[in-house]
Structure formats: C-alpha cells, structure tokens
Image: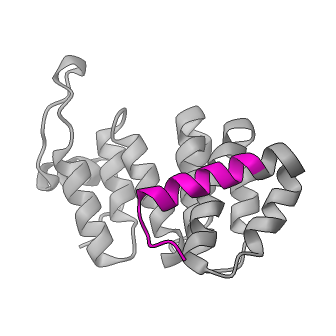
Amino acid sequence: NQPYSRARGRMADTLVSELIAQRGEEATRDAVLAVSDEQFRAGLARELAQRMANKDPQGTAAWANGLPAGETRERAMAEAISEWAQKDAVAAGNYLQKLGPSPEFDRARQEYAQRAARNDPEGAVAWAQSITDQQRRNEEQRLTGYGWTDESAGVARMPVSEAKKLILERGLPVRA
C-alpha cells in the first residue's frame, strides 16, 4: 500500500534482490507475476529484468515479451532493451525492429533511442520517430534532437529539423 515514491522503488529493488538470493531467478519470476498491484508488479518486473539482462539480455527480452500485455511487459521490455543496447546496440535494435510498430513497445523504443543518442544521434532521432504515441514521440524527438551536447566527442546540438534532413538523406522513414 506504499504510495509511488523513491522509497517504493528501493523496496522493489530490495525485494527482487532478496527473492533472487533466497529462491533463485525462476521462483522470483513467478513471485513477481503473482503480485496483484499492477504498478508494483511492473516495478518489480523492471528490477528483475535489469538483473537478468546483465547476464542474458536476449533471453531477458524474450522473457519480457512473453509476459501478459500491459505495464508489466512494457517496463520489463524497456529495461531489457536498455541493458541489451549497452552491450550490443545492433542486436538490440534488430530485435526491437522485429517487434513491429506496436504501442506496447514504445517505452522500449524510447529507451533504445536514449541509449543510441550517445553514439548515433541520427539513429536516435530515427528511433524516436518510430514511437507510436505522439506525445511520447514528440518528447523523445525533443530530447534526442537537442540532447547532443557532448562537445568533447565533437557532437554539437542539432535541431530536430536538421536531424530529419539527415535521416531523409539516409533513406530512413520519418513520421510527421
């Protein structure tokens, strides 16, 4: 019954750690899915996905994709893709692309765009364009379009309109 807060997030982190230590990963997956509060279950699934993806990001993405539709799957998939993109951005992107343009994977596409923005700004904007929810897409475009500020890496700020030109030049689709 704890309200949504940082403390609730820390509690989810602690619970997942303790469940894994005491019961193992498989029993933890079952315990997470048995939680009736959807918001808390989604938070637990995200924490579990983060730990699982450190060892096996592809397997974690497959597990997350097999969860029942809803926030639990969305958050677990987003975390799996985020962790996977750190290890192998190409493989994570290919997997995410195969899932198609479903709104249930918008959060994963958003996470992927944020990871890609560090090394591939134009690609990040393309991933932001693939988000189906207009509000989320606009926010991510704003972040990826203006978030390139690592001057030491030679990356400068670029308005989304200029990034779209680059994407079009490369033959990638751009949403309105």
From the image, give the main secondary structure of the stretch colored magenta. helix
x, y (%) of residue 155? 20, 28
Asked if the stretch drawn in magenta spans residue 16, the answer is yes
The residue segment tinted magenta is 1-18
Identity of the residue furthest to the front in this view: 1
Q: Nearer the viewer, residue 159 or 171?
A: 159
Tell me if residue 166 comes above or below residue 41 in the rendering: above
Can residue 125 be seen? yes
**Can the viewer see residue 66 in this picture?**
no
Measured as percent of width and height from the top left, residue 39 is found at 54, 75
63 relative position to 71: left or right: right
Residue at left 52%, top 52%? 10
Residue 36 in the image, given as x and y percentages of width and height: 68, 82
Is 120 in front, or is 107? 107
Which quadrant holds the C terminus? bottom left
- What residue do we see at 20% from left, 17% from top? 152
Q: Quadrant of residue 72?
A: bottom right
**Vertical placement of residue 170 versus 99, above or below:** above
Image quarter of residue 42:
bottom right
